[in-house]
Amino acid sequence: MEAKSIMKNKYWVIAGATLIIVIIAIVVVVKRDKKPLLSFEKIKRGDITATVSATGQINPVVWAQVGAQVSGQIIKLYADFNSVVKKGQLLALIDPTPFKAALAQANANLLSAKAGIAQAKATMELDKSNYERNLSLPPELVSKQNLETLKATYDVAAANFSASQAALLQAQANYKIANFNLEHTRILSPLNGVVITRDVNNGQTVAAAFQTPDLFDIAENLEKMESDTNVVETDIGKVKVGQKAEFTVDSYPNTVFTGTVSIVRNAPMTIQNVVNYDVIIYVDNKDLMLKPGMTSYVTIDVGKKDNILMIPNAALRFAPKNSDTILRIYSLHNKLPDWVKVSSSDEKREWYRITKVWVYRNNRFIPIPIQTGIRDNNYTELIRGDLKEGDGVVTGYQTGQ
């Protein structure tokens, strides 16, 4: 029995050792042969349309803000939202009563100034005549003191006449101002169009002391609209006048509107610490679907090339997860083509700046430096590089790898 027990124990020891060896062998083999599960995509030929995306706001091409140049109470409105108006049409009336009184007072002052200048002129001419008549008499008939008195009287009359002329000019100016203020109690439309907004009500008092209050916004023609689009500075160099653009608005998410870039303004605007430039896109709005103030989501076509080699954008974003692998293959920079410049003083930094895609050959990642051109949302133009149509490039790891 004891011998059988010993034999049995030896059997289990041998079996256990054999199992351990098998497991170790399997682990070594699996570990040695394990390869990453990668996603590949082939380089192909096709067409690329490069675009710039931005957001903007729909506005009328020509519109005006109508304000009040005088202060007072609105006593009558003659236009409302969506009213069709003509140039010169009365939109609102500010109470003219105080302005009529001011004009009447200015008119009275003007009449008084005219009478004053007539009187001063008559007095001056009389004193001048007296002085000149006595001046022409023989010296023995008029004393020197009398001549000096007559001359002084004439000079005073001339000065009074000049003062009355200044008073007349001032009265005329005051009359024009009073008349101007009275005329501008009538708020008139500056153009033919449609009232977009009305920011005033009957009985409301408007104050024009510091700035002109905005009473109405009038669009000349809602059939011609524009999108005031904000393009970031990194893209503005690609945008040119005459380029085609497409956009959507939230109200019609399934409708694509088309337009043309008409103006690229040079004035910078900083929005959330990002420099933007205003790009104006004209659009036909004959069906009146677009309304002022709508947010537009714009795509501008900035370039197109046909039948070119294309690399998937995912391949440009891919990099091996193992940084040691990247460092090991870094020595390949000595085999780079002539058009790739690598600084000898800081080769590693320069290498990482080179645009490259990765292939997987002989159980290792190999970077292929390339020169790229225009791109769209999915593909980028391949200008130069050791790749050809049909070559597969790594676009990423499969799920879980």
Image: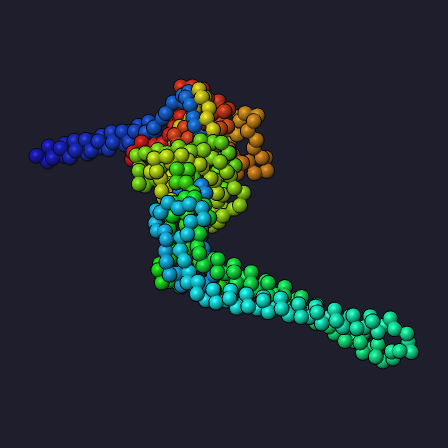
Q: Residue at x 40, y 34 (%)?
A: 284
Q: In this view, does 77 lie above or below 351?
A: below
* Residue at the (44%, 31%) spot, across then down: 244
Q: In this view, does 145 lie above or below 98?
A: below
Of residues 22 and 15, the one drawn nearer to the viewer in this rendering: 22
Can the viewer see residue 272? no
Left or right of residue 151, residue 60 in this image:
left
Q: Which colour scheme is used?
A: rainbow
Judged from this view, the residue extending furthest toward the left is 1
Quadrant in which the N terminus appears: top left
The residue at 33%/38% (across/down) is: 289
Please give the name of the residue rendered at 35% of the width and 60% of the height, measured from the top-left corner. Answer: 202
Foreground pick, 163 / 313: 163
The quarter of the rendered structure image containing the C terminus is top left
Between 335 and 167, the one nearer to me in the picture: 167
* Position of 225 relative to 340 (above/below): below
Q: In this view, does 352 lie above or below 111?
A: above
Residue 181 seen: yes
Left or right, 95 with reference to 16: right
Residue 260 placement (x, y as % from top left): 45, 33
- Between 149 and 177, the one nearer to me in the picture: 149
Residue 178 placement (x, y as % from top left)? 52, 63
396 sits to left or right of 372? left
Query: Residue 156's x, y, as percent?
Result: 74, 74
Question: Residue 170: x, y in percent?
Answer: 61, 65
**Total tally of numbered discs in the picture:** 0
